[in-house]
Amino acid sequence: MKALNIDEFLAQDERKDLLRLLTAGSVDDGKSTLIGRLLYDSKRLYEDQLQALERDSRRVGNAGDHIDYALLCDGLKAEREQGITIDVAYRYFSTNRRKFIIADTPGHEQYTRNMITGGSTANLAIILVDARQGVVTQTCRHSYLVSLLGIRHLVLAVNKMDLVSFSQERFESIVEEYRTWLMTQGIDIPDLRFIPLSALEGDNVVTKSVNTPWYEGPSLMEYLETVPIDQDINMESLRFPVQYVLRPNLDFRGFAGKLSSGIVRVGDEVEALPSGRRSRVKQIVTYDGELAEAFAPQSVTVTLEDEIDLSRGDMLVLPEDKPMVGHHLRTMLVWMDEQPLDMSKPFYLKHTTNTTRARVTRLYHRVDINTAQRVNAEGMRLNEIAEVAITTTSPLMFDRYGENRQTGAFILIDPVTNFTSAVGMILDKGDDDTAGGRIGVSLSEYGISERDAEVVKHFCEELRRHTGIDIECLE
């Protein structure tokens, strides 16, 4: 009986879904303290962690006589010295209902790229507000970034309520101020909640507080355990980017990858992009055996009834629901490189399993993330956000980011340093004329001699004639 109970427990644990969330907010609003309190009050710390936390609180803590719960997340020496979050810290834990991955992101404007990194896979965001300060510039900036990242669930946690005597009037005034700002900026958050709490004292963090009898909603942990996230993944549009072709013997040829969205079933008619060839699903194979159907975000191997030439970067979709295909993209770009954008420089663009050469061909406008207003700009620097046009050398199969986060996102990689220069969200298919659509090939940059220049120019003309990409050979 005991073995059976253990098996049931393990099976139940495997069936738990996973919630990815991030914390954001202004400096010293209590993000790390809130995460530490969640772990502490939910009894998810080991004995040695508790002992180390108490010891470090006495030695380098910033919470007076209290345990400094922020030390559970702020592990860097500079973070502990300054009492701030600098880099993204991830914490993993689970309760009886759900598994969690929390990204503790920094609040400083100079670390915007760190927040983008932490929020790129998040289902939910917790934005903290100091009850004494109310809605500040960082609150607005992080709210805009949450909207930009397509995060559907947002909790505005009004922290440090103990410092305003748990005033209902103060809480309601902050709620009204925040709602007014969202309406003014035209930002729509599908699921928005407001929770008054004290991270340091534990009020409304894991259990409801007696200090806020006027608050009728759930505690933060109760909400995190019950917030529905099953609709966050697009289950309507099949997108299966091929990652690897498996050929263990002459009788098996399978296409391995992770379902970005949708459901695939044995017998379904699928179309391979960009070739447009069609076939039917013969098998869906996993390590544990064959399946009749698979859904996102499962990793599977698919075999087809017909021999179709597929390789890494290609995509299987349903014929009646295909993504956009093209070389030109209209995107929202977040610059993450210390070096400013050079529009004459080529990049590698990585999208799903496809990597191709690309160039930023036009900068429409930059977004002032403090005010969410559009401003004119001629370039991009670290942490800046702008709407740009991008042209790629090979076609991409993509969706709008708002419709499908997995196939609507990409990164730009510096081909020299291999550094991630930018992350992008696809807004729409770019117009050839609007996007510029020209890729310049510098002959001198690649050391091409005058004798070989004519051969290269002829190659560019042939490539332009067959692909439609305007490739210009620069002296």
Image (cartoon, helix red, strand yellow):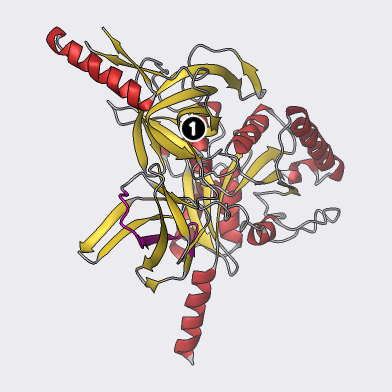
Residue drawn at the location 26% of the way across and 65% of the way down: 252
Residue under numbered circle 1: 424
Q: Amino acid at mark 1?
A: Gly
Question: Where residue 255 appears, x then y in whole percent?
Answer: 33, 56
Question: Where residue 193 appears, x then y in whole percent?
Answer: 74, 48
Q: Is residue 196 visible?
A: yes
Q: Quadrant of residue 266?
A: bottom left
Q: Quadrant of the C terminus?
A: top left
Question: Quick check: 305 above or below 211?
Answer: below
Q: Most extreme residue toward the bottom, as rendered?
A: 1
- Closer to the camera, 160 or 386? 386
- Closer to the camera, 175 or 374? 374
Question: Quick check: 379 above or below 285?
Answer: above
What SS does tag 1 mark?
strand
State the extent of the magenta-drawn residues as a range: 294-310
Q: Is residue 235 left or right of residue 461?
A: right
Q: Is residue 384 visible?
A: no
